[in-house]
Image (cartoon, rainbow, N blue to C red):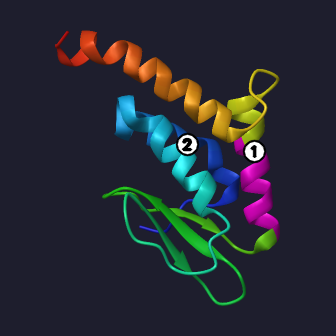
Amino acid sequence: MDPWTVDDLDRWLDWIHQRHNEFDYRYIYLVYLAAHAREPLQGEVTVAVNPGGGCVLRAGVGDRGLLLADDQERERFAQHLRRRYCGDRYPSMQAWEAAQHEDFLDEAPWRFGGR
């Protein structure tokens, strides 16, 4: 199956939220950071770098990926994430991720049991 394109960006982000559930914020932040990688990356998020500056980001196993064709699409992607997740509430994606992580930690005992 072909990767998603920038035109399908919100559908891809929705897929990440559904697929990764309570850890979705982590994948969103990692793809944000990985979007400007110039070298291939392996891990929770992978980046396949294409000739000409494009790349395919994948958020975990089973992701068909998001194709960013060039540097312009990489920047468009990053701007879209900042608008969608930060809005007027957070000054940066790093601040957004930190707030999401705090929410996760607050809910973890309830979700997973414990003290």
Task: Kindly identify which numbered label has been placed on residue 13.
Answer: 2
> Percent from the top left, x then y, of residue 89?
76, 21
Image coordinates of residue 95 in percent, x first then y, are 66, 33
Looking at the image, residue 33 sits to the left or right of residue 41; the answer is right
Segment colored magenta: 72-81
Q: Residue at position x 75%, y 40% from top?
A: 82
Q: Which residue is mark 1?
A: 80
Q: Position of residue 96 (x, y in %)?
A: 64, 31
Residue 79 versus residue 18: which sits nearer the camera? 79
Image position, residue 70 (x, y; %): 75, 75
Q: Which one is earlier in the sequence, the residue at label 2 or at label 1?
A: 2
Q: Quarter of the image for the N terminus: give it.
A: bottom left
Look at label 1 and name its amino acid. His
Amino acid type, callout 2: Leu
Q: Main secondary structure of the magenta part?
A: helix
Q: Quadrant of residue 94?
A: top right
